[in-house]
Image: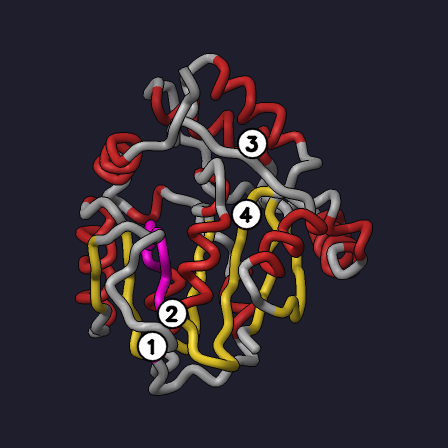
Amino acid sequence: MERQSTPDHWERYWAEREEIDDVYSNEDRIKRALDRLPLEGRWCMEVGAGSGRDSLELAQRGAKVIVLDYTRSSFHVIRKQAEQLGLVVYPVCADARQMPFREGDLSLVFHQGLMEHFRDPLPLLKENARVLHSGGHLLVDVPQRFHVYTIGKQIMIALDRWFAGWETQYSPAELETWVKKSGLEVESTYGEWFVPGFFYRSLRYFLMRTKITVLPKYPPEIPPFGAMGRAFRESFKKTRLGLYTCAMIGTLGRKP
């Protein structure tokens, strides 16, 4: 039987992670990708809302933000953060392939950690494009194929130990092709590595789950190597080759 990512996987995931500080953020890569878009007063939607961090960032910029998910468990996490920040977001529980919105309703649709859980992502992307108005943007952020994360993940999936049940991954060229298939024009593609790295994160999670000890979320840097590493990453990830070494990639598309 083919493995699937199901609502039960995500209900369990967010039930175990109500303390949002225990969950690694995306290091503001979504924020940076959307910084140049004029979103104040415009309707935006995060699909597969997860922690809602990025949606709350957009709400702070003055956007009117919808968070859509097919499970309700993450809404509790999002509402808790929104109340602490004095922000309003609009949760909608629905299937991302059949969203309860009219064509052209939104200025921005974005998702991170969602598309890789669909064996056929085209219905999802076409629905994303449908609800955008002309000139609106879609941002899709996914795991990058050529990374050690892929190896570890596929082993865990084969052992039926992966937290999300099943997921895939994409190269930069593959991701851009899917965005174009949805009828959008590709504007840009970015990439980012895990910092701290995949092996440290895996060890930290294992030690937390087994209650052996709790490692710091971000270990202290070793000077001057920390600064040198940051400078190299910032430069290399802007190259096409660099994208093929990143852990995560994203493509920004625009509706004609």
Magenta-drawn stretch contains 47: yes
Mark 4 vs 2, N-terminal side: 2
Labelled disc at residue 142 = 4
Kind of residue at badge 4: Val
Mark 4 vs 3, N-terminal side: 4
Labelled disc at residue 200 = 3
Residue 4, how many percent across, how many down? 39, 28
Colour pattern: secondary structure
Magenta-drawn stretch contains 210: no
Labelled disc at residue 211 = none
Residue 6, how many percent across, how many down? 31, 32
Count neighbours of disc 1 (C-alpha within 10 A) and say few if under 14, some if 14 to 19, many if 20 or more.
some
Count neighbours of disc 4 (C-alpha within 10 A) and say few if under 14, some if 14 to 19, many if 20 or more.
many
Kind of residue at badge 3: Tyr
Count neighbours of disc 3 (C-alpha within 10 A) and say few if under 14, some if 14 to 19, many if 20 or more.
some
Residue at numbered disc 2: 131
Q: Are marks 1 and 2 in contact (CB under 8 Å)?
A: yes
Residue at numbered disc 1: 105
Say which of 27 and 37 sits in front.
37
Report the Cα–Cα distance between label 3 and label 2: 40 Å
- Mark 1 vs mark 3: give the one in front: 1
Mark 1 vs 4, N-terminal side: 1
Left or right: 145 in relation to 128 = right
Left or right: 30 in relation to 236 = left
Report the Cα–Cα distance between label 4 and label 3: 21 Å
- Mark 3 vs mark 2: give the one in front: 2
Q: Are marks 1 and 4 in contact (CB under 8 Å)?
A: no
- Mark 1 vs mark 4: give the one in front: 1
Report the Cα–Cα distance between label 1 and label 4: 25 Å
